[in-house]
Image (cartoon, coloured by chain):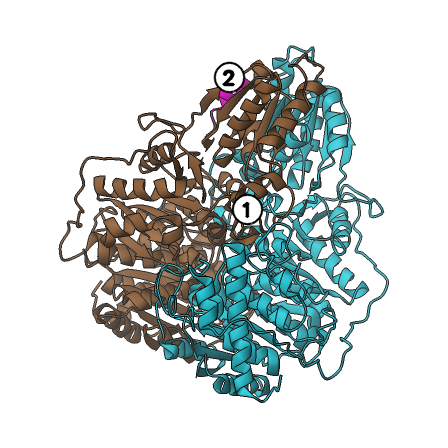
Chain colours: A cyan, B brown
């Protein structure tokens, strides 16, 4: 098609609309009306402004296009058809079993960087890609994000506006399809484009208000967006949901449904077309910047020293960053507490301060990994729960990111429950394909930090605020999926992780005095758990106690129970059952019933209760 | 004190500062510098503008004060001392074991409505209280929220600004302590008050910029805030962190630490004072509005009919709302899908559209329950994860709220994984004091909706998108903490919930043909689980299969394992292990391996594997 011909652009838009209707009708579900509103916006973008190498989705210089309004997936797939990336037959597999063209886009589809469909995620992820373009890859690619008006109610969008505005990410453009109608009914601001422009403009963005069905205005706005310097651009486009089909145009109650009479609608839209678009290839440099690397020299700690695992984490990540130029780190404005400061000091160019915006932090990490960077996003374990939906979306995005949560558990002490990560192990175990690690000493932490870099999926590492004794030598290795047997005894097995490892070891000493000998296992790899070894050890002692600085649900205890499910052994779970208040770390462990004395009592109860002959006088 | 005497107000501020230093020093931890910046703001508020009945925290006409910057708790406790609510001795128990005066405020403290300490929660919760004042209680109380500047990076704050601005909540005032310094270092905007004013003003708020250490300016601003009509007010106060003590004033690296030399600081601040403030009592009406109630007439469904549990939920909640005037509902702009529409139609005065802002929705519910209302906050199960941190804070707030998540599991079908709640059971089981319910049919759903109203803590109810057969009569009861034994058989026990109950029943029929008889349990109350009954039934069959439309971690299977931990039985967990794509609901269940055939195969493997003599010819 002649790229300068606005009539051709309108024809292309009609094709995108028709194909959105066709795909949804073939599927019997989907969001055609949400696709139709943005058809001109995407037609002009595709034909005139997007710069991608259609034959090579991995080309580092490609522009990026994110459908933050992921439910408009029929439109995205129609664009891919027009660009020759998918066939018409593939288009019509939309939403069917096995099809790559799912109800909402995922990176299974070429040119899709992150999964969307949970509104408010795409723009923050786009900020991550734009940061990567500017500061890591150092390539001039542009990041285009198609947003809905409804999703502007999500706070995460404003974290993104603030971050991008403050950074002046001119390589980011939000194209906002203001079609006035949400799922249930009208949005708060309807077609009041200026209401949005005032807000977004206040966050430092360049804003343009246009008629989203006028190819000329769109063309101007997209060109203006790319040429604007020092500021990201938001194009506020007034559109009609279901534009072009009178039966649904601008009508309520038509969200997320195929059209009742698709044939008639297609006729009204002028029938099917078979326009193919020659998408502009990227220009400019094709080689992303690389930071230098070197040999990995992990910090090492002397056995017997007292070192907080958060401290070891920070030092190890700084070392990893020295060894590998692809490691980057994101902070939730608590780097002094999480000890990410060590990385910030060593590698300021690869350190991203996200301020207190955990959702933006996780989304940015997800965006950066789409370009091959290895992000570590770090805050308190408790505050990672703020981004739980985004972690879920990272998993659906098949993203490889590492999350580090400090201040796990009641052992933080006086700050009280709002600062305690007590549900993090449950939450992250229940993330598809995740790895959950919880080291107990500094050398173990350092090794695990190094191991996480090349794991796939969402990795979670939990660190502890207080100092704990170093019990492992610096040369010991800690493969993910294994565990450490710290001592063996015949009467019971105590499975611990993190701070409770030290309580379990102390309990074992006390129990020796009681004449009871226990096996103590350090289950530093909570997921995957070393099921074989645990089964062997637990079956041999016949009684198990798990102890964790976490609510009893969904954490270490449940993981061990699952590992033993086929060949079960009586087990008592110790975890935090009461709501903590403020107290010293040791008081907290005692109050929660997860300290050495609680473990000792539990083992004694178990060994007595079982009628076995155990020890001597026990009190 | 003479309320008109600005010098006295400065003296009071000095006392609040001294007491913040004293409390933190006694504790050996805490956030004195973050307290000191807001001392004048809170002194003037306490002495001249706050209207509370100091002797009666439950007085419905009391103003509300929320410390969204919860780490400034020493300042709050110093205010309570000045008001005569706590003694000086109590003040000095700050952060010690058993003290009500925790590191961050919780409702254990008189006049504290919600727990804070996870930044960005207090203002959204304040929006809930302001909505309650305006639309439910219909009382003229004012809601004052002390915010930090750092927390303005949280998207949830902008959900709150948007919601309050759009509603014109003139009874809400945000007092923003712009002390320029976050935890790690300077904030994005430092002392650029106008950067904040532009943003907040764009969201429809009245904004005032003042010197936060000038009692006169503060007094004017607070009066202006109360008298402003139709708009909420944000007071942007330029302050110094650690104001008044030269060793810490406006210095980095002094966050969250007691002062090195407290004695010297107290001297510099003019020494301890013992000013007592006569807080103004509330004026105006004292009786909150009550909506009328009546008899509960739950909807009933015919056994054998096909009805989605989400439909039954909507109809039951509408009926509950008719019976009880204290029931209110909040929607995440998906009421047509969750079927909350039924409530919206029946009770528009008690229905709150929160648009796509799940954090604001949960926070508003938490604020409303602080005034005794019974909120139901409803969206897709998947999208409740967006508010997981706020659910955590609701639990720490000892809040009584009900969350309802629709579209649980892969059984939603074509929409794909972003729309599927697959980690919700794990996430909500790991909330302290929570109740987790998952009904399988319409009559059960209706009964459980009614039961949830008076439960304490965070209740979570999961509903299903598709229709399921009604298997229970309308008069059957479903006590929380119990389960239903749907059929008994000797070879194995299948424990299911929600959509998998129907698959388990169908599997049992198939297994009969295989000569295998199974017990089928409907574990509709996942937390608390009916551990006694499960133990009895599972022990008697000796083999257990759990099946859930959820990731394998942290949900029903882990709950059953925990119930059986002391007297274990071999168990196989069936859950969703692979990342789903799009497919029909039945294809999804098959693909995930949680359908009737998967259950049948698993039971057959178990019964064969155990060497027992089971059935006849099995294929």
Residue A61 vertical placement versus B68 (above, below): below
Q: Position of residue B181 (x, y in %)?
A: 51, 69
Q: Position of residue B331 (x, y in %)?
A: 36, 54
The residue at the point 43 percent across, 25 percent down is B482
Label 2: element kind:
loop
Residue B536 included in the magenta stretch of the image: yes
Would you name the residue on which mark 2 appears?
A: B488
In depth, the one of B490 and A314 nearer the eye is B490
Q: Which chain is home to disc 1?
A: B
The residue at the point 22 percent across, 46 percent down is B56
Would you name the residue on which mark 1 appears?
A: B584
The residue at the point 75 percent across, 82 percent down is A285
Q: Which of the numbered marks, if any, corresponds to residue A272?
A: none
Cα–Cα span, label 1 and label 2: 31 Å
Q: Quadrant of residue B591?
A: top right
The residue at the point 51 percent across, 40 percent down is B425
């Amino acid at each position: 098609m002649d790229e300068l011909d606005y009539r051709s652009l309108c024809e292309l838009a009609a094709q995108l609309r028709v194909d959105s209707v066709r795909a949804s009708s073939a599927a019997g579900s989907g969001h055609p009306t949400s696709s139709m509103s943005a058809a001109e916006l995407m037609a002009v973008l595709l034909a005139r402004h997007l710069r991608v190498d259609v034959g090579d989705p991995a080309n580092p210089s490609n522009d990026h296009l994110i459908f933050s309004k992921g439910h408009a997936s029929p439109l995205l797939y129609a664009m891919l058809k027009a660009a020759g990336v998918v066939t018409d037959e593939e288009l019509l597999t939309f939403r069917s079993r096995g099809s790559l063209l799912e109800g909402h886009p995922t990176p299974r589809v070429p040119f899709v960087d992150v999964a969307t469909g949970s509104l408010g995620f795409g723009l923050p992820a786009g900020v991550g890609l734009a940061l990567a373009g500017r500061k890591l890859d150092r390539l001039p690619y542009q990041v285009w994000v198609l947003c809905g008006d409804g999703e502007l109610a999500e706070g995460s969008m404003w974290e993104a506006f603030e971050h991008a505005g403050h950074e002046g990410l001119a390589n980011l453009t939000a194209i906002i399809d203001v079609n006035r109608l949400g799922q249930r009914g009208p949005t708060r601001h309807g077609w009041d484009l200026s209401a949005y422009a005032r807000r977004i403009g206040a966050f430092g963005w360049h804003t343009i208000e246009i008629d989203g069905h006028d190819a000329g205005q769109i063309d101007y706005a997209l060109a203006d967006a790319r040429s604007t310097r020092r500021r990201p651009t938001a194009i506020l486009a007034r559109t009609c949901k279901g534009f072009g089909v009178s039966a649904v145009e601008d009508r309520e109650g038509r969200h997320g449904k195929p059209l009742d009479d698709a044939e008639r609608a297609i006729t009204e839209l002028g029938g099917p077309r078979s326009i193919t678009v020659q998408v502009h290839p990227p220009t400019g440099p094709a080689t992303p910047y690389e930071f230098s690397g070197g040999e990995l020299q992990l910090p090492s700690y002397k056995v017997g020293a007292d070192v907080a695992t958060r401290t070891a984490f920070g030092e190890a990540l700084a070392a990893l960053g020295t060894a590998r130029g692809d490691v980057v780190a994101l902070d939730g404005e608590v780097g002094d507490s999480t000890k990410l400061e060590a990385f910030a000091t060593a590698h300021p160019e690869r350190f991203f301060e996200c301020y207190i915006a955990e959702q933006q932090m996780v989304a940015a990490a997800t965006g950066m990994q789409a370009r091959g960077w290895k992000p570590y996003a770090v805050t308190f374990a408790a505050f990672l729960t703020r981004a739980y939906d985004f972690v879920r979306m990272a998993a659906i995005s098949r993203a490889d990111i590492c999350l580090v949560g400090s201040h796990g558990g009641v052992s933080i002490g006086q700050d009280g429950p709002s600062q305690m990560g007590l549900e993090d192990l449950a939450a992250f175990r229940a993330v598809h394909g995740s790895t959950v690690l919880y080291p107990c000493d500094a050398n173990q932490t350092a090794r695990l930090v190094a191991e996480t870099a090349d794991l796939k999926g969402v990795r979670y590492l939990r660190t502890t605020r207080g100092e704990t004794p170093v019990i492992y030598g610096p040369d010991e290795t800690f493969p993910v999926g294994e565990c450490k047997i710290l001592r063996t005894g015949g009467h019971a097995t105590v499975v611990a992780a993190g701070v409770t490892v030290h309580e379990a070891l102390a309990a074992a000493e006390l129990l020796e005095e009681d004449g009871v000998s226990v096996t103590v296992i350090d289950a530093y790899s909570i997921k995957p758990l070393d099921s074989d070894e645990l089964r062997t050890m637990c079956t041999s002692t016949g009684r198990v106690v798990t102890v964790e600085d976490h609510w009893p649900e969904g954490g270490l205890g449940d993981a061990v129970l699952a590992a033993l499910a086929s060949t079960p052994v009586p087990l008592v779970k110790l975890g935090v059952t009461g709501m903590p208040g403020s107290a010293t770390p040791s008081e907290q462990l005692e109050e929660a019933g997860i300290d050495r004395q609680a473990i000792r009592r539990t083992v004694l109860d178990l060994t007595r209760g079982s009628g076995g002959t155990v020890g001597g006088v026990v009190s």
